[in-house]
Image (spheres, rainbow, N blue to C red):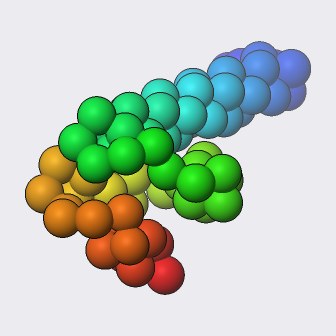
Amino acid sequence: MSTLYEQWTKKGEAKGEAKGEAKGRAKEIIRTLTRRLESPSELLRKKINSIRDIKKLDELVDFAWTCVSLDEFATALK
């Protein structure tokens, strides 16, 4: 049986890993949009960086490769 401290530590590690994974996906989206289209505005970057749902971020990574404009991409964030 694990102690309360061990449970908190594991929970904190999992949160940290999820946050890092989300940050990496957001960075990938911004890099893809920049290379394919143009550099996203600061507002669009903030919206992308605020997303924590990994599944949504994965979908947006794929969409960043196929969208035809930053406006189209921004619409997917709504």
- The picture places residue 24, in percent across and down from the top left corner, at 47, 29
- The picture places residue 37, in percent across and down from the top left corner, at 28, 48
Residue 5 versus residue 55: which sits nearer the camera?
A: 55
Residue at x 13% of width, y 57% of height: 66
- The picture places residue 4, in percent across and down from the top left corner, at 85, 27
Q: Residue furthest right?
A: 5
Residue 39 versus residue 53: which sits nearer the camera?
A: 39
Residue 25 versus residue 17: which sits nearer the camera?
A: 25
Q: Is residue 59 left or right of residue 39?
A: left
Q: Is residue 33 above or below residue 16?
A: below
Residue at x 57% of width, y 27% of height: 20
Q: Is residue 50 left or right of residue 34?
A: right
Quadrant location of the N terminus? top right
Q: Residue furthest left?
A: 66
- The picture places residue 78, in percent across and down from the top left corner, at 49, 81
Kindly tell me whether residue 59 is visible in this rendering.
no
Kindly tell me whether residue 42 is visible in this rendering.
yes
